[in-house]
Amino acid sequence: MLTINSKSFSPRLGTAVVLLSLVGACIDDADGSDGGDELSTDVTTNAASARLPVSLGTAGNFVILAKTGISTVPPAVITGALGVSPVAATAITGFSLTLDSTNVFSTSPQVTGKVFAADYAAPTPSNLTTAVHDMEHAFTDAAGRAPDFTEVGAGNIGGMTLIPGTYKWGTAVLVPTNVTLRGSSTDVWIFEIAQNLTMSSSTNIFLAGGALPRNVFWQVGGGVTLGSNAHLEGVVLAKTAISLKSAASVNGRLLSQTAVTLIQNKVVQPAN
């Protein structure tokens, strides 16, 4: 157990040959000014940089994928494909869907991409079944990764700058103020959260140093709530509902094993 700035951290090594040496913390806000805790490392061989992203399989073809429904209060701005399965297209509400002449997909004025449902024509039902299976497999994969850090901030990570690695909490996680993920374009963050993930209104997850949203994974055993005007970066793998309040935004993916609820939100799939 290591205590930094009166906060306890339990670093655990993913492999015995890796030397991970935590050397302290400094005060560093998202804009580089004083005001938040930074977990920093001096690394002989950094386990975090060697971590692999969570494979999404065909679930990665969707910006939003859900099992029981996707709803919105317009206008939403969605970039990427939407999908629901095993439910029918009637579980997609607020999007003013227009079924394509092939009956394979729909379109929406709020979606730059196609919309799929389990009751559409082949091959859509089969493809969605596979995508949902891949989503559930990705959730299990992320949940099973060996953590580098446990119980950081006792579940309150507001104001922190977090290095790459796998973080695990047996509790809910709260983001009451801005958080920065600092690393390179090849670094990976996996957040294993046993309960809920909640972002307060007007808070942000910032990426710094070249970090990419496609390499950030929020595996949440409960539900996910983004407050009004909040912004999240990364792929959300939620066991239950994902709810975005008014004008919240996501640069990543929303993959829910129940429903996704939107209110005038912007959700954009990350670049590959």
Image (cartoon, rainbow, N blue to C red):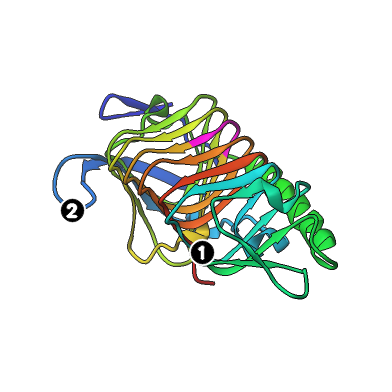
Where's residue 228, x and y in %? 34, 41
Does residue 157 show up?
yes
Q: SS at mark 1?
A: loop
Residue 221 falls within the magenta-colored stretch = yes
Residue 104 figure quarter = bottom right
Q: Amino acid at mark 1?
A: Gln
Question: How packed is label 2: few (under 14 Cα within 10 Å), some, or many (20 or more)?
Answer: few
Q: Position of residue 168 (x, y in %)?
A: 53, 35
**217, above or below 116, in the image:** above
Label 2 amino acid?
Gly
Write down the residue under mark 1: 269
Pick the front one: 238 or 73: 73
The percent coordinates of residue 36 (x first, y second) are 22, 39
Q: Which residue is mark 2?
A: 32
Q: In the image as oriented, which residue stretches furthest toward the left?
A: 33
Q: Nearer the viewer, mark 2 or mark 1?
A: 1
Q: Residues within 10 Å of mark 1 (few under 14, many from 20)?
A: many
Magenta span: 220-224
Does residue 25 appear to the left or right of 77 in the view shown? Answer: left
Report x, y in % for residue 213.
46, 60
Q: Is residue 144 above or below residue 90?
A: above
Q: In which quadrant will I find the N terminus?
A: top left
Q: Are marks 2 and 1 in contact (CB under 8 Å)?
A: no
